[in-house]
Amino acid sequence: MESAKQIVESLGLEAHQEGGFFRRTYTSQLNASIGPEQSDRPTLTCIYYMLTSDSPIGHLHVNRSDIVHFFHSGGPIEYTLVSPNGELRTTTLGPDIEAGHQLQLAVPGGWWKASELKASEYGLISEAVSPGFDYGDMNFVTKDGIAARFPSLAAQLLRFVSNR
């Protein structure tokens, strides 16, 4: 079995600002006018994303686009999700379907999302983003943002806030 370091090198992954490592693997050549500003955007992008024991948290953030996550290998990754109306959910992507793990997870745009590697050296997934990912569409959730929007969830969410 390959180590996390070997996978990072083999797949050409780089550090991601939300935590973990990534590499964009696909950008659709099909563009569309998307959103209220009708910006011309790729209709789909895909990445590899990996959390490691050295970088086990994907910090709490929100994306404008819908994202589908696909589990590949390694250990389970637990996702903490908050809907726009404050409903808290957890879902685990991982290899053990009998233990309730899922192989894919769809997260609608506008939902808050954090991820955490559970007791493993690494967890490797892919993400398909539609409309295509743009850094301008991603915002990190702050402690003040939690307090203002969903104060009753602060105890569960604060550990996922980036210290940047």
Image: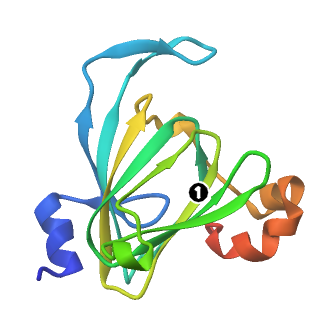
Residue occupied by mark 1: 113
Q: Nearer the viewer, residue 46 or 19?
A: 46
Amino acid at the residue labelled 1: Lys
**Residue at image coords 33%, 35%:** 45
Which percent across, then down, holds residue 142? 73, 59
Q: Nearer the viewer, residue 133 or 87?
A: 87
Instruction: Check the image and report above or below for 71 versus 127.
Output: below
User: What's the colour scheme?
Assistant: rainbow
Instruction: Check the image and report above or below for 84 versus 101.
Output: above
Q: Decide if residue 11 is on the left or right side of residue 121.
A: left
Q: Quadrant of the C terminus?
A: bottom right
Which percent across, then down, holds residue 42? 36, 23
Instruction: Check the image and report above or below for 92 versus 83.
Output: below
- Badge 1: few (under 14), some or many (20 or more) residues near its Cα, within 10 Å? many
Which percent across, then down, holds residue 44? 35, 30
**Residue at image coords 55%, 11%:** 38
Regarding mark 1 in the picture, which secondary structure is present there?
strand
Q: Decide if residue 83 is on the left or right side of residue 70.
A: right
